[in-house]
Image (cartoon, grey):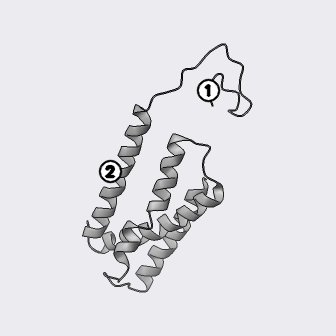
Amino acid sequence: MCSRCLGLYPLLFGLIAAQIALRAPMSWLGDIFVALVLPLPALVDWGRGRFNPRTGTNALRLATGLLLGAALARTLYLHMRVPFHGLAALQLGLLLVSAAGVELAVRLRPRPRVDPNAPPDVEDGGQRGSGT
């Protein structure tokens, strides 16, 4: 299991269970912040990792997973109570558009030319001529 998932899933399920048990209200003062700002560090770290997998640390991934877990727990709770709750739908839409943009940028970026005769680099795990 990846570090981000290790932070995300236990907190996600725990907070959903807590909101159900406590009959959490449908509106909290910080809902917009929780839904739209807390996922940003995970999205940025994931996006950086898509461009350069060697960036980031497991501690950073764990921390961003915890923030993402808290955000998703709140919006999934709202969605469970009122299907397609406006805030949950907005969060989902923004995350999907952001992820699609990152994936498109990764796929369209120019790739370094690979020289099949180049010796393997120690730093890149033996991939020949990766150019890094």
Q: Which of the image's four quarters has the C terminus?
A: top right
Which residue shows up at 36% across the image and 45% down it?
A: 100
Q: Is residue 27 above or below residue 79?
A: below
Residue 120: mark in rendering: none
Crowd band around label 1 with a 10 angstrom C-alpha radius: few (<14), some (14–19), many (20+): some
Crowd band around label 2 with a 10 angstrom C-alpha radius: few (<14), some (14–19), many (20+): few
Which residue shows up at 50% across the image and 67% down it?
A: 67
Q: At label 1, which amino acid type do we have?
A: Ser
Q: Given the current orientation, which residue lies at the most extreme right position?
A: 122
Which residue shows up at 30% across the image and 56% down it?
A: 93
Residue 90 placed where, x, y %? 28, 63
Q: Earlier in the sequence, mark 2 or mark 1?
A: 2
Identify the element where label 1 is drawn: loop
Question: Toward the viewer: 63 or 10?
Answer: 63
Residue 6 placed where, x, y %? 59, 60
Q: Nearer the viewer, mark 2 or mark 1?
A: 1
Q: Which residue is mark 2?
A: 97
Question: Toward the viewer: 33 or 96?
Answer: 33
**Camera sees residue 122:** yes
Residue 97 placed where, x, y %? 32, 50
**Which quadrant of the view contains residue 106?**
top left
Identify the element where label 2 is drawn: helix
**Camera sees residue 77:** no
Which residue shows up at 43% across the image and 69% down it?
A: 71
User: Number of numbered discs present?
Assistant: 2
Residue 86 placed where, x, y %? 25, 68
The answer to the question of whether label 2 and label 1 lie on touching residues, with beta carbons closer than 8 A, is no
Q: Which residue is mark 1?
A: 130
Q: At label 2, which amino acid type do we have?
A: Val
Left or right: where 41 falls relative to 57:
left
